[in-house]
Image (cartoon, rainbow, N blue to C red):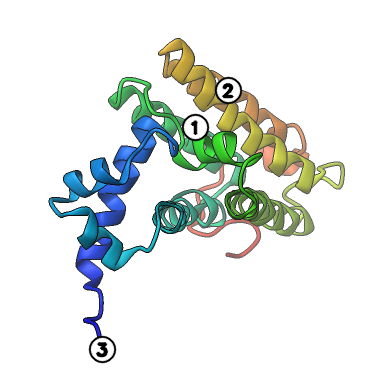
Amino acid sequence: MGRKPDPAVRERILQEAEHVIHLKGYHSASLDEIAKACGMTKANLFHHYGSKADLALAVLDYKIADFRSRKVQPLCAQAAPELAIEAMFEEGARFFHGIGCRAGCFVGNIALEMSDRDEAFRRRVGRFFAEWAASMAECLERTKASGYFRASLDSRASAEAIVALYEGAIMLTRSQRDAKIFRRVGKVARSILEQHKTEDRRKRTMMAPKTPCGC
């Protein structure tokens, strides 16, 4: 019976593999490079992950879990959804400015590179983006039911538009090396929701610790 893989070693492998794949892309990143970055041999790497695809999918799951906690879940933890959306873009502006507007979104990069080549990758990233939009739409539906937004708000379409704007902002920021794009696009994303607020909500400043949907 072989030794059980060490969770701490596995996490280090995922972190290093993410860095290499993020910078070089899935096809250009080699297992030799990843093993070297981890300070181990390729044979040691195979002890933890049986193939390059297995490792890349594990990295994708690792990144998706991180994105889920930072992007998907917090929307309903804010006092007002439109402010949470603008803050999300502001955070993106700071992050990409800090890394020189390089590398882009790991999940988005994998989606572009692998969706037409490998169904396992396409399904994984497809589920993530669908979950992101659906979670946002559910929060918007609850706030609409509470009277915060008017019935005119199409929660699903608005959520999908905001996700598309965020991923598009990454592409423009990366290609133009201008993180301020995030702030400009963030204002547009906020306006998608702002225009559907009820008159009462437009006049009031939301300072409550919970969102209008009660989360």
Q: Residue at x 59, y 53 (%)?
A: 128
Query: Which residue is identified by label 1?
Result: 89
How far is disc 1 from disc 3 in space, using C-alphas?
Answer: 49 Å
Q: Nearer the viewer, mark 2 or mark 3?
A: 3
User: Image quadrant for the C terminus?
Assistant: bottom right
The label shown at residue 129 is: none
Q: Earlier in the sequence, mark 1 or mark 3?
A: 3
Query: Which residue is identified by label 2?
Result: 185
Determine whether, in the image, residue 169 is placed left or right of residue 133: left
Q: Which of the 4 image quadrants contains residue 114?
A: top right
Task: Kindly tell me whether residue 83 is visible in this rendering.
Answer: no
Determine whether, in the image, residue 189 is placed left or right of residue 102: right
Query: Which residue is identified by label 3?
Result: 1
Between 74 and 178, the one lying in front of the other is 178
Between 137 and 62, the one lying in front of the other is 62
Q: Residue 166 in the image: x percent, y percent?
A: 57, 32
Task: Kindly tell me whether residue 100 is visible in this rendering.
Answer: yes
- For label 3, the crowd category at 10 Å Cα-Cα, with few meaning under 14, some 14 to 19 and many 20 or more, is few
> Is mark 1 in CB contact (under 8 Å) with mark 3?
no
- For label 1, the crowd category at 10 Å Cα-Cα, with few meaning under 14, some 14 to 19 and many 20 or more, is many
How far is disc 2 from disc 3 in space, using C-alphas?
Answer: 55 Å
Q: Amino acid at mark 2?
A: Val
